[in-house]
Amino acid sequence: MEKRKAFFHNKKIVIIAAIVLAVIAAGIIVYFIASAAPEDTSADGVETSSAVTVAEEESSEEKTETSNADMLTSDTKSTAATDESEAAIDRESSPLPQSVSSASSQNATSAANDVRTDTSPASSHTHAWVDHTVQVWVPNMVTVVDQPEQTIPGARFYTMNEAGEYIANGPTYWFENGFTKDDLKEIIKEGLRNADSNGLYNGVYYGNYQNVTKTIPAVTHEEDQGYYEEKTDYQYCSVCGQHK
């Protein structure tokens, strides 16, 4: 048993090679047998092959014709679309017919006349005139008194001329700026106390005085004490806005 196993192990490569060669030889034999088989020359076989060939050729021709027809239809549509586009462009660029142009011009003129005039029955109306007023300044210049006119009383003493007459041209004391009658009495007392034999003190007679007055003008300025007055400058129609 061990010897058999050793034998087969040693001859393993040889056995495999022999099997491969046998398979190749069988394939060659089958090939030659198939090549040597007689050709089928029966009429049925020829007619069937011819019929198949003719059918295939007819089918090919039909496909070719269909393809040509489709291409022709596509070209026709493309040409028609191009012709329509060119015709549309020609229509747009070409001038309007004389009758259409004249009618459009007349319509435009009529519409312009409707806008400019206000005499058509549809647009005529009775004007409703409304006064448009503005505020106008009316000047009024007046004299404003800042300080009123004043009359200041005073006392004027006498002097004696060469003829021995008393003349009221001596010093005058005005009751203003805080000067009072009490101040005047003190002056008189001093004059009488110091009077000479003629009753004069420094050439002035203080035994009597003349009541006098003087006027101080008012302090004023000019001022415009005007006012606004509402006046109508024009009238307008409240419907259409026309002025008059």
Image: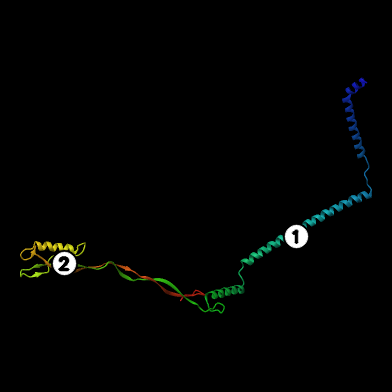
Q: Secondary structure at mark 2?
A: strand
Q: Residue at x 88, y 25 (%)?
A: 12
Residue flagged by tag 2: what amino acid is it?
A: Ala
62 sits left or right of 208 in the view:
right
Q: Residue furthest top?
A: 3
Query: Mark 1 sits on what residue?
Result: 73
Q: Measured along the vertical axis of the image, is residue 38 above or below residue 56?
A: above
Front one among 64 and 143: 143
Q: Position of residue 23 (x, y in %)?
A: 90, 32
Query: Mark 2 sits on what residue?
Result: 155
Say which mark, if any, is on residue 34.
none
Front one among 163 and 119: 163
Q: Position of residue 193 (x, y in %)?
A: 9, 62
Q: Secondary structure at mark 1?
A: helix
Q: Measured along the vertical axis of the image, is residue 223 above or below residue 32?
A: below
114 sits left or right of 209 in the view:
right
Quadrant including the N terminus: top right
Front one among 174 and 209: 209
Q: Residue at x 89, y 52 (%)?
A: 51
Q: Residue at x 69, y 62 (%)?
A: 81
* Figure disc tally: 2
Q: CA distance from mark 1 to mark 2?
A: 140 Å
Report crowding for label 2: few under 14, some 14 to 19, many 20 or more residues within 10 A (C-alpha): some
